[in-house]
Amino acid sequence: MQTLLVGIDAGCRSVLDPLFEDDELPHLESIFAEGSSGPLESQIPPWTPSAWPSLYTGVNPGKHGVFGFLDFDGYDWDVVNASRVREHTIWELLDQHGYSSVVVNAPVTHPPRPIDGAVLPGYTAPENPRCHPEGLLDDVRHEIGGYRVYAPRNLSESESIEWYRRLTRMRGEAFRYLAGRFDPDFGFVQFQSTDTVFHEHPGDEDIIRSVYRAVDEQVGAILRDCDPETVIVASDHGIGEYNGYEFRVNDFLRDEGYVKTVRGGEGMPSWSTIAGNQLQRGEESSPRQQGVAERGLALAAKVGITSQRIGDILSRAGLEEFVAKRVPEDFIRAATEQVDFPNSVAYMRDRIECGVRINLEGRDPEGVVSPEEYDEVRSELVEKLQAARTPDGRPVFDTVAPREAFFDGPYSDDAVDVVCVPTDFDQFLSAQLRGRQFGAPREPWNHKLNGIFAAAGSGIDVEADCADAHLFDVAPTILATLGVPASDRMDGSVLPVVDSAGEQSYPAYEAGETVETDDECVEARLADLGYLE
């Protein structure tokens, strides 16, 4: 193997350094100690489904088309998949140059496109994903004794810890089996549990160390068996504690006159703790046909008795979690106050996108803002959001800017119109309506902007300075380690750890048919982790 990429979701030095100091991660530490390393600045938004495609295509979301976990068609949505990533990946460009690849657990790679080699998809794929070549999943399961994309649902703490280790072991064993079978020039194995553990067990140092030890063990086995000439370690973003507030953007926009709401209507739920209860039990959602009880709750919502108000009362009484485990999802959907997307001027449709979407006439199905008004409305939104302050007087946002400041490319129109970057990523953004603009962060740990990059091997300049590395730089750098020119569409540059192989124009990416995810189990897992509100 010429080049190995080890992806560690949410990896960052603030997590790694204490483990290095305690000699808990000898294999990962050796890569950092013997090579060149530095922080890796992520993109906006710094979340798995958009950031990993940016890392492995080298382009910003405006060029590859994925801005979050959800892909929107008007006011409707579906979970993103590989058919939404509309740019060539590293392994597809290598394929054009006659190099083979094995890719295991990379997010947003289902359904995979054919290459010389193997692709075993990861995050956002269904539990039994289509793989390349056909029949690969059965082969892997037979060879290593089982393989899952996700852990089972409804686990106890001890069971979840064991499943973190088991999933990590599955990634390593599957990668080693496929590397032995396909003898690839390039290998990419991604570990997702290093992110999941912070969402499910935030700040639990013992569990976090256990997960990272399991990852390090597999990295060591891969290095031993595959003996790559070059090893690169990279993450999509960092992780850290949130000490600020939860800022409910749609409550803010409602108070400013931009958001209209509807009670007892259709749409995404606004109180995720209860709305996700069915998913938390591992059940699939039933068809959303309102029965007598649902209709009654919908009528109650129309006169102001919403699930948000009930939720506040239950929370004060300490009964929120108790009820969340027992109340059907459809009941809460029927009684929830929601953003009335068609009648609103602007709204946050998905907190992961980090921004506000304007309901534009001619672009959105029932747009209310004319093209002539667009610039004025957007400027007003930028001004008002820039002025937003937390209860203790701090700016909510570091940056509020038109989307052109962050995205360019043929899919930029799918992005939010106003990008909102939270101050130090210490303010937790929410699209929920809760009747108040601020509250305590729903998750005490969440994503931060700086991840990690390290490169080691015989062809790596260990004296090179990687202090300014950006997520977009990883793809052209990996190509350079194999002597392959970067695409002239890439937004990143080859990092100084290796000599550039230049640039070339590759054939334009030809988007095929968009495949619907439409998988309630995938949606359930995203809701469990707080990604779907």
Image (cartoon, helix red, strand yellow):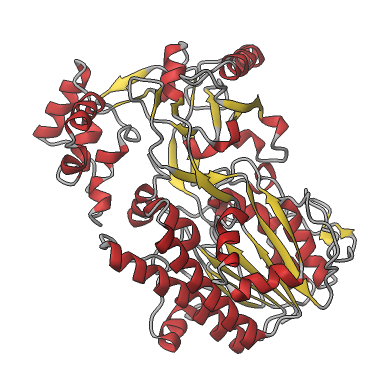
Residue 165 vertical placement versus 284 (above, below): below
In this view, the residue in front, 38 or 483, is 38
Residue 31 vertical placement versus 280 (above, below): below
| Residue 8 visible, this angle | yes
Q: Residue at x 67, y 77 (%)?
A: 116
Q: Position of residue 297 (x, y in %)?
A: 15, 28
Q: Taking 137 as reference, is 296 left or right?
A: left
Q: Quadrant of the N terminus?
A: bottom right
Give the residue furthest to the front: 22
| Residue 518 visible, this angle | no
Q: Taking 176 as reference, is 275 left or right?
A: left
Q: Residue at x 29, y 68 (%)?
A: 159
- In which image quadrant can residue 188 be found? bottom right
Give the residue furthest to the left: 292
Q: Residue at x 82, y 78 (%)?
A: 458
Q: Taking 180 as reference, is 100 left or right?
A: right
Q: Position of residue 177 (x, y in %)?
A: 54, 86
Q: How many marks?
A: 0
- In which image quadrant can residue 321 be found? top left
Q: Position of residue 416 (x, y in %)?
A: 58, 31
Q: Residue at x 62, y 44 (%)?
A: 449
- In which image quadrant can residue 227 be found? bottom right
Q: Taking 465 as reference, is 191 left or right?
A: left
Residue 519 vertical placement versus 152 (above, below): above
In this view, the residue in front, 502 or 92, is 502
Q: Position of residue 62 (x, y in %)?
A: 67, 41
Q: Quadrant of the C terminus?
A: top left
